[in-house]
């Protein structure tokens, strides 16, 4: 029986499957490298959820930018909502050192607005178009994902998953004057 090629083919297949599972369980799905890190951030223009203003990323050259992709249906986005708002109040609205931008993807305007109200978001929030062009330009795998952009519009860090206060402050600390 063990001299048969079918016997060995089955065992080799089983061992390959086990090796694949072992590799999969030891790999952190949030540690996905981005080809955009070190490159100029893709430019975009987005209208605020309230419909009163537009923002174009290229017009923010000279400022630090925290760009967060989120969705109202995302559980982890709910967890990080307070972190981003507190960060905006500390570095955005009070000192204008860092521009915080949130772009909702795969969402409806009504649900995104309700989410913003529920979590007291005061920083700039927009909604990606129905085709998801901004998210595609950034290669978004899921939400939340956050991009850290320096004053020359170069992405210097990308984080997949919810951010913490420690994480955002650590990333921007060397760039704050």
Image (cartoon, grey):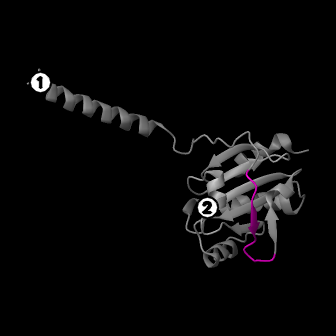
Q: Is 41 drawn above or below residue 69 in the view shown?
A: above
Q: Between residues 88 and 99, which one lies in front from this camera angle?
A: 99
Spot the residue most to the bottom. Answer: 110
Return the x and y of residue 142 as percentages of the image width and height: 56, 55
x, y percentage for residue 131? 59, 65
Point out residue 54 in the picture as x, y percentages from the top left corner.
80, 69
Question: Farthest residue toward the top?
Answer: 3
**Which residue is pictured at 51% across the width and 44% down the height?**
29
Residue pictured at 69% horizontal, 57% vertical: 68
Contact between labelled residues 2 and 1, with CB atoms less than 8 Å apart: no
Q: What's drawn in magenta, residue-wise?
A: 42-52
Q: In which quarter of the image is residue 134?
A: bottom right
Residue 59 is marked as: none
Query: Is residue 24 found left or right of 87 in the rendered image?
Result: left
Q: Is residue 89 magenta?
A: no
User: Would residue 147 be visible to someone looking at this image?
Assistant: yes
Query: Going 15% across and 29% down the picture, which residue do you hit?
Result: 6
Which quadrant of the figure has residue 82? Answer: bottom right
Q: Mark 2 points at which residue?
A: 77
In this rendering, position of residue 151 left or right of residue 101: right
Which of the pair 176/126 is nearer the observer? Answer: 126
Q: Which residue is drawn at 65% across and 54% down?
A: 137
Q: Which residue occupies the foreground of this view, 81 or 123? A: 123
Q: Name the residue under label 1.
A: 4
Q: What element carries label 1?
A: loop
Q: Nearer the viewer, mark 1 or mark 2?
A: 1
């Amino acid at each position: 029986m063990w001299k048969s090629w079918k016997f060995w083919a089955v065992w080799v297949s089983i061992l390959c499957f086990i090796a694949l599972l072992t590799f999969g369980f030891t790999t952190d799905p949030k540690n996905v490298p981005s080809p955009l890190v070190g490159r100029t951030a893709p430019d975009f223009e987005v209208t605020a959820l309230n419909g009163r203003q537009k923002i174009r990323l290229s017009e923010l050259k000279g400022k630090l930018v925290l760009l967060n992709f989120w969705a109202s249906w995302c559980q982890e986005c709910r967890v990080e909502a307070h972190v981003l708002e507190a960060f905006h109040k500390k570095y955005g609205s009070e000192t204008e050192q860092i521009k915080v931008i949130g772009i909702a993807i795969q969402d409806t305007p009504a649900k995104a607005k309700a989410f913003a109200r529920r979590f007291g978001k005061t920083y700039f929030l927009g909604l990606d178009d129905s085709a998801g062009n901004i998210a595609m330009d950034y290669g978004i795998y899921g939400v939340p994902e956050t991009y850290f952009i320096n004053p020359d519009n170069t992405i210097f860090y990308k984080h997949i998953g919810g951010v913490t206060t420690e994480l955002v402050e650590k990333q921007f600390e060397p760039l704050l004057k």
